[in-house]
Amino acid sequence: MKTVQILSFFGPPGSGKGTVAERCVRDLGFTMLSTGNVCRKHIQERTELGEELKSYIDAGQLVPDELITKMVLKWLEEIIKSKDKVILDGFPRTKRQAELFTDALQSDPMLADIEFSVVHFDVSDKEILKRIESRLVCDNKRCQAVYSATVDEVTEGDACKMCGTPLIRRSDDNLEVARERLGVFAKFKQDLLGYYQDFGHRVLVFVPTGGLPDDDFREFQKLLI
Ligand code: AMP
């Protein structure tokens, strides 16, 4: 049985997890699940679950641990039948999610041979607020490519370089909700990192500069060696 490598990207909103994850998919053969993207897809497709998710996301609050973990495990069980390098972008985000996830790794025979590591994207709140203000995303929910208005020199309504769909601002990318989300992140951060330390999980710390994506990605790759 092959070993599946799972990287969990953990960091505040706007810390560049999504951008690096996209590059890992494009250049390093990873498959990724962004829990935020899955939630937004449900909302856009107006599924029953989407109605429930919307209330949490619009308020900058986390979706309940059991619900989000179930979504991830369902996806993972399916994906590892054919892929062996996986990124979980934005999961686990709380100690409870990490506990539920590690329990599943230990008890689910389908998830038996997994090497799990965490990449902690370490960026200050001040820098995050600056980045969120300039973040634009592709409105095509199958694409959801991420841009920085300042670094990529794009503006709202410009065409996505990947699929041509107009770029928009995310509804939760306003300063009020961003501050709320940063508060939520800070509240769960120490508990989660403490859990990883106690459990002996590998945690790699990555400090993205937010500058040119190629430079950041080169630094990121050095971490994985
Ligand atoms: P993101 O795109 O990663 O910034 O996530 C956007 C929103 O999706 C978050 O503010 C939460 O409401 C929800 N979400 C994404 N991932 C998780 C998670 N692991 N646990 C709970 N809620 C999540």
Image: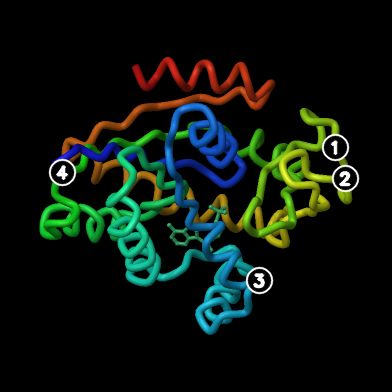
Residue 101 spot, x, y in % from top left: 25, 56
Taking 171 as reference, is 88 left or right? left
Mark earlier in primary sequence (4, 1): 4
Disc 4 marks which residue?
A: 113
Mark earlier in primary sequence (3, 4): 3
Q: Are marks 3 and 4 in contact (CB under 8 Å)?
A: no
Question: Marks 3/1: CA distance?
Answer: 24 Å
Q: Residue at x 65, y 51 (%)?
A: 143
Residue 125 spot, x, y in % from top left: 60, 39
Taking 134 as reference, is 72 left or right? left
Residue 176: which numbered mark, if any? none
Residue type beneath disc 3: Gln
Mark earlier in primary sequence (3, 1): 3
Q: Which quadrant of the rendered structure holds the C terminus?
A: top left
At mark 3, the secondary structure is helix
Residue type beneath disc 1: Val
At mark 2, the secondary structure is loop
Disc 3 marks which residue?
A: 44
Q: Are marks 2 and 1 in contact (CB under 8 Å)?
A: yes
